[in-house]
Image (cartoon, helix red, strand yellow):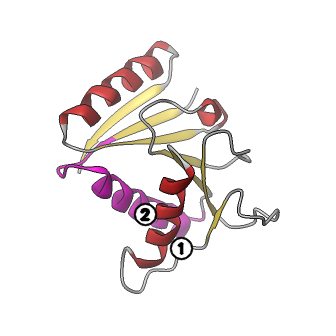
Amino acid sequence: MARVDFYILKQEGSQSRNTFACRLAEKAYRLDKTVHIHTVNREDAERINDLLWTFRDGSFVPHELLGSGSSSRTAPITIGSGDDPVEPRDLLINLCDAIPACAETFPRVAELVSSDEPSKQESRKRFAAYRDKGHTLETHDV
């Protein structure tokens, strides 16, 4: 069973989730952890790919966009969407409204919840689904 951390953000919207995902990925990278960031679609994955270069001055987060033609997958951070094949990683950062099928293969999952009502409602569904599967759940207000 995985440990699932729900991060409740004070800000609204997908941009706050995306920026926090970058911060969390950077922190995990500095702790020598591997990460996969899972997005709703290819466009969102490309947005995270770009944001990882610019979200904070002076940061360096080596990452790779899955399905970009490279088959090495040696970067500590990968970004994908949909049914992109995901290799085992230490942490999944989920930016989808649903739990991705690959979530069961990760020892830790981070669910990011912005303060807008639709995001909260979808996160409640994911929380209940994780709970029903017996995962360890933690909630953090950030």
Q: Residue furthest bottom?
A: 58
The residue at the point 58 percent across, 55 percent down is 35
Query: Do the numbered discs 2 and 1 sit on residues whose CB atoms are within 8 Å?
Result: yes
The residue at the point 41 percent across, 56 percent down is 21
- The local crowd at label 1, few if under 14, some if 14 to 19, many if 20 or more residues have their Cα within 10 Å, is some
The residue at the point 57 percent across, 52 percent down is 42
Pointer 1: what residue? Answer: 61
Residue 63 occupies quadrant = bottom right
Q: Is residue 21 left or right of residue 101?
A: left
Residue nearest the viewer, comparing 92 with 98? 98
Disc tally is 2
Residue nearest the viewer, comparing 32 with 57? 57
Residue nearest the viewer, comparing 3 with 54? 54
Pointer 2: what residue? Answer: 22
- The local crowd at label 2, few if under 14, some if 14 to 19, many if 20 or more residues have their Cα within 10 Å, is many
Residue 122 percent across, percent down from the top left: 33, 28
Q: Regarding mark 2 in the picture, which secondary structure is present there?
A: helix
Q: Is residue 78 highlighted in magenta? A: no
Q: Regarding mark 1 in the picture, which secondary structure is present there?
A: loop
